[in-house]
Amino acid sequence: MHNLLELLLSWIYPPHCVACRRRGAGLCASCMAACVPLAPPQRLRRLPADSPLERVQGVYAFTSIVRQTIHAFKYQGQRQLGMALAQLLEPHLPWEPAALVPVPLYRARLRERGFNQAALLAQHLGQRWRLPVCDQLQRLRDTGQQVGRSKAERAVNVQAAFTWHGPPPPARVLLIDDVLTTGATLSACAVALRQAGALQVQGLTVARALD
C-alpha cells in the first residue's frame, strides 16, 4: 500500500531535480555529472594511531549539489534521493568488506524522521555491490546534533553510545553514513563493532566537510 501511494503521488506530482528544478528526476543526469569526487588523498580523514577505524573517507565535498541532495534526502523526506547518492558512491568501494553496516539512529529520532538515511543508503549500495547489510548496530541514547560541537565535544558526546546486538559481526565491516566531519560518530560505532568481534572496520560516507 505504501509503495502504491508513492507511485500515485509521483504520477500526480512528478519529481523535480533538487538542484536545478528540472522535471523528471530527484537528481538529474546533468547535476549528477557535475558532482566531481575529491582526489583520493582529500577524501581521507586523518585518524589517531589508536583509532578503532582503519580508515575513513568521504568521497565528495559537502558543498553545492551534494549538500543540497543530502539535506533534501535527510531532512525533507525525499527518500528517492538515496538511490542517486548510492549511484554517486557506487564507483568508490574502497576495499572488499564482508558486509555493510549503517550508522544507526536513536529510536526516537527514527520515529520522528520515519527512516534512517544511512540504512537506506546502505541498502541501495548493498544491492549495487552485492554485499549483505547488517543492521544489528544500535544507538543506546539520543546524542543530539553534533553540529556546533568541537572535535573533543563530539567524541565525548558519542562515547559508548553504540552497541552490537546479535551474533558476532563479520570480520571485515564497512560503516556507511551520509557525511563525515570529525569521524567521532564512525569511531564510536567502530569501537562497538570491534568489541563485538569485528577485526577490521572502515568508514565510508558520501561527503566530507572540508577543513
Image (cartoon, rainbow, N blue to C red):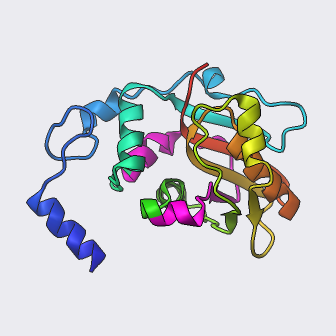
Observer-nearest residue: 159 or 7?
Answer: 159
Figure disc tally: 0
Q: Is residue 113 above or below residue 208?
A: below
Q: Position of residue 62 (x, y in %)?
A: 48, 29
Q: Position of residue 145 (x, y in %)?
A: 58, 44
Observer-nearest residue: 75 or 63?
Answer: 75
Q: Is residue 20 above or below residue 85?
A: above
86 lies left or right of 108: left
In the image as oriented, which residue stretches furthest toward the left? 12
117 lies left or right of 7: right
In the image as oriented, which residue stretches furthest toward the bottom? 1
Identify the image quadrant of residue 205: top right
Q: Position of residue 155 (x, y in %)?
A: 76, 39
Seen at 80% across and 54% down, the residue is: 160
In the image as oriented, which residue stretches furthest toward the right? 50
Identify the image quadrant of residue 36: top left
Seen at 27% across and 80% down, the residue is: 1
Give the magenta range: 82-111
Seen at 23% across and 67% down, the residue is: 6
Task: Residue 55: tell me if it is visible.
Answer: no
Task: Residue 103: tell me if it is visible.
Answer: yes
Identify the image quadrant of residue 203: top right
Q: Position of residue 140 (x, y in %)?
A: 71, 63
Report if residue 186 lies within the magenta region: no
In the image as oriented, which residue stretches furthest toward the top? 211
Report if residue 108 lies within the magenta region: yes
50 lies left or right of 81: right
Q: Is residue 199 above or below residue 107?
A: above
Q: Is residue 74 above or below residue 209?
A: below
Quarter that holds the C terminus: top right
Observer-nearest residue: 153 or 123?
Answer: 153
